[in-house]
């Protein structure tokens, strides 16, 4: 009987299973993206439209001191894209719940965290793809990196870490709301408050004091400011640390909560 | 095959209770299933069948009582239980964007078997469940019956010694149903312990050695199919008469043959008996003596409704909400 030699005797073995279970689920979710390419297409079209809209429609009216607006804008658009992309994580998990897949997974001897980790990793892969595409579009509409290629790659890495953190927030929301529509509906207000009241599109200097106090101290602004510093230059280290701390903190709080919720989902 | 615990019980349930808010889904049920045996859990909508299966497969935690599978406590040592069980839930849980083969391989990998074993096993199951032609198509394109079969195949990928099937044939046509029964019978012949839930007396009769009837979270009857049938009458003789007056007379006269009841219209007498043919002869004789001429005289197998009418005095499912077809209703609220 093949299944019986499997009582985990060592931590190493259990860890190996956690990794292999997570990869199996990641593979499954990436396969869905291949089978339903429209998911990827639609999650790319929107950010591309945003880039073009801000660049050509609002770009003429918005001036940011000392820098071309497109260069100011691009890091913000990246942040906005990965933040909104994370909503799909919750929607996808809610779908898996509805279809009974999570129930089946929970009857298997697989690692508790694997269903969620596999989902967030697959979504991270999707984000990397989308960001690469947006960079191409950005460069085509005159976006220029003022620092170095390394700093630019650092900015991408920082954005992906932020993206990963956000997917855990929405994983929890998906497990909580339990259906795709509610997961989507619950996510929008959170996104609006995080993304639009931030430094993603415009400097916070023009905001009223009360709003600015919030906008200067929230994770989306932190990620946008850090990514911006990395591609535009200026004081960088502090901003990068702040953003990394936000992302690490979000992962540390939300991943255990999401896994806890997963174990209670029947 | 996993060696069963010393007492030979593959499943043991003691005073299991579970409530969802105000709804008492399970109200202290106890039963045992010997290793290699098949238990049929029979009951109407909302009886608590799925809740029992979910607790035994470690998906839900009981509020009260204790349950073990192969001697292992399902609440305390759920990981060890999961290594030894297979589950095909009430609604086929297949990933629609994966092919049939990919679905099986995914579940195979998640049961921690080597890639080559999974590959071989998936191939075998695809053959056995008649999915060869569709194995490399995405499951989105499968019919309901194919999904069911794929779901059952997935539950078997790691050859679990204890198997749970929640309404395995609901929604299947008669041919697919008896095909599935054959596959299940083969598994049982190989020594798998099985707990199967159903709404159909016929199915419980066909698959199970022992049947437990539950209603409202309580066990209301228990025994072999033959025992239950003799208790409730395995056959129903229906005598339809021209009007209510004649039916009332017939009902009174036929009381000697078996328990008589009038159907809601009041024109048909139903008699529950264990031996249909002999009864039919007697019925004809008595009706003739009484000079009553039936419009029709029929004999049919007891349905679940008859079972419940006899055991509980209320009709199965009549006072419970019927689930939306195919929907995963009512489990939406979480159990907190
Ligand atoms: N997650 C849940 N939240 C709230 N109530 C629930 C939940 N799951 C089950 N119930 C309730 O518990 C009772 C038993 O439900 P269960 O699903 O076990 O019945 P069942 O015998 O499987 O019925 P069916 O034949 O319709 O599948 C029902 O009254 C149901 O409404
Ligand atoms: Mg059920």
Image (cartoon, coloured by chain):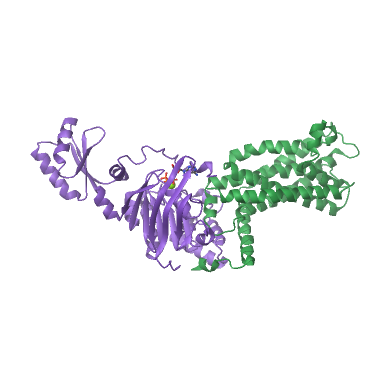
Q: Colour of chain B?
A: purple
Q: Name which quarter of the figure residue B113 lies in.
A: bottom right
Can the viewer see residue A256? yes
Let me know if residue A38 appears in the view.
Answer: no
Taking the image as shown, residue B299 lies to the left or right of residue B312, namely left
Residue furthest out toward the left? B289
Q: Nearer the viewer, residue B80 or B159?
A: B80
Residue closest to the eye, B107 or B227 = B227
In the shown orientation, is residue B155 left or right of residue A215? left
Quadrant holding the C terminus of chain B: top right
Q: Position of residue A101 (x, y in %)?
A: 54, 50
Relative to A259, residue A66 above or below: above
Q: Which chain is green?
A: A
Residue A23 relative to residue A198: left or right: left
Q: Position of residue B286 (x, y in %)?
A: 11, 41
User: With A199 as the anchor, is A127 left or right in this view?
Assistant: left
Q: How many marks?
A: 0
Residue shown at 77%/39% (left/top)? Answer: A51
Q: Which residue: 63% across, 38% down?
A: A186
What residue occupies the far right of the structure in this picture?
Answer: A66
Q: Quadrant of residue B207?
A: bottom left
> How far across and how far down the image is residue A117, in percent?
64, 54
**x, y percentage for residue B244?**
19, 31
Q: Quadrant of the N terminus of chain B?
A: bottom left
């Amino acid at each position: 009987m093949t299944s019986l030699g499997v009582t985990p005797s060592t931590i190493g073995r259990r860890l190996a299973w956690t990794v292999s279970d997570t990869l199996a689920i990641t593979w499954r979710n990436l396969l869905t993206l291949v089978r339903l390419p429209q998911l990827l297409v639609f999650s790319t079209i929107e950010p591309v439209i945003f880039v073009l809209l801000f660049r050509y429609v609002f770009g003429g009216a918005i001036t940011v001191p000392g820098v071309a607006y497109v260069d100011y804008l691009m890091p913000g658009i990246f942040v906005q894209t990965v933040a909104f992309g994370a909503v799909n994580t919750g929607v996808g998990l809610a779908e898996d719940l509805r279809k009974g897949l999570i129930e089946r997974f929970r009857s298997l001897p697989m690692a508790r965290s694997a269903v969620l980790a596999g989902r967030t990793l697959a979504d991270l892969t999707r984000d990397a793809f989308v960001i690469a595409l947006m960079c191409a579009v950005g460069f085509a509409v005159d976006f220029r990196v003022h620092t170095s290629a390394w700093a630019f790659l650092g900015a991408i890495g920082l954005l992906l870490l932020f993206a990963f953190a956000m997917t855990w927030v929405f994983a929890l929301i998906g497990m909580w709301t339990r259906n795709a529509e509610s997961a989507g509906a619950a996510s929008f207000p959170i996104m609006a408050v995080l993304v639009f009241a931030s430094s993603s599109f415009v400097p916070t200097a023009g905001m009223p004091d009360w709003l600015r106090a919030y906008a200067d101290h929230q994770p989306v602004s932190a990620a946008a400011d850090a990514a911006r510093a990395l591609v535009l230059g200026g004081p960088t280290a502090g901003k990068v640390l702040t953003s990394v701390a936000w992302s690490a903190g979000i992962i540390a709080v939300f991943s255990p909560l999401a896994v806890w919720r997963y174990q209670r989902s029947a | 095959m996993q060696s069963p615990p010393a007492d030979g019980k593959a499943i043991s349930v003691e005073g299991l209770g579970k409530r969802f808010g105000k709804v008492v889904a399970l109200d202290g049920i106890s039963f045992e299933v010997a290793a290699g045996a098949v238990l049929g859990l029979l009951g109407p909508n909302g009886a608590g069948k799925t809740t029992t299966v979910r607790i035994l497969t470690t998906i839900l935690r009981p509020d009260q009582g204790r349950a073990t599978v192969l001697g292992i406590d399902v609440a305390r040592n759920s990981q060890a239980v999961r290594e030894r069980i297979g589950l095909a839930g009430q609604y086929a849980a297949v990933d629609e964007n994966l092919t049939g083969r990919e679905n099986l391989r995914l579940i195979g990998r998640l049961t921690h078997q080597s890639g080559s074993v999974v590959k071989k096993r998936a191939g075998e199951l695809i053959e056995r469940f008649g999915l060869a032609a569709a194995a490399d198509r995405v499951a989105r394109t499968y019919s309901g019956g194919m999904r069911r079969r794929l779901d059952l195949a997935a539950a078997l990928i790691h050859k679990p010694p204890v198997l749970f099937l929640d309404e395995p044939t609901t929604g299947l046509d008669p041919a697919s149903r008896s095909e599935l029964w054959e596959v299940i019978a083969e598994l049982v012949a190989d020594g798998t312990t099985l707990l199967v839930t159903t709404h159909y007396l016929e199915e419980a009769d066909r698959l199970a050695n022992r049947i437990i009837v539950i209603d409202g979270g309580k066990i209301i009857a228990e025994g072999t199919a033959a025992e239950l049938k003799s208790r409730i009458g395995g056959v129903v003789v229906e005598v339809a008469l021209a009007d209510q007056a004649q039916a009332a007379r017939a009902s009174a006269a036929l009381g000697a043959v078996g328990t008589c009841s009038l159907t809601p219209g009041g024109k048909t007498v139903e008699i529950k008996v264990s031996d249909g043919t002999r009864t039919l002869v007697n019925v004809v004789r008595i009706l003739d003596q009484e000079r009553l001429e039936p419009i029709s005289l029929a004999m049919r197998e007891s349905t679940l409704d008859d079972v419940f009418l006899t055991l509980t005095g209320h009709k199965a499912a009549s006072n419970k909400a019927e689930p939306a077809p195919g929907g995963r209703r009512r489990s939406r609220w979480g159990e907190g």
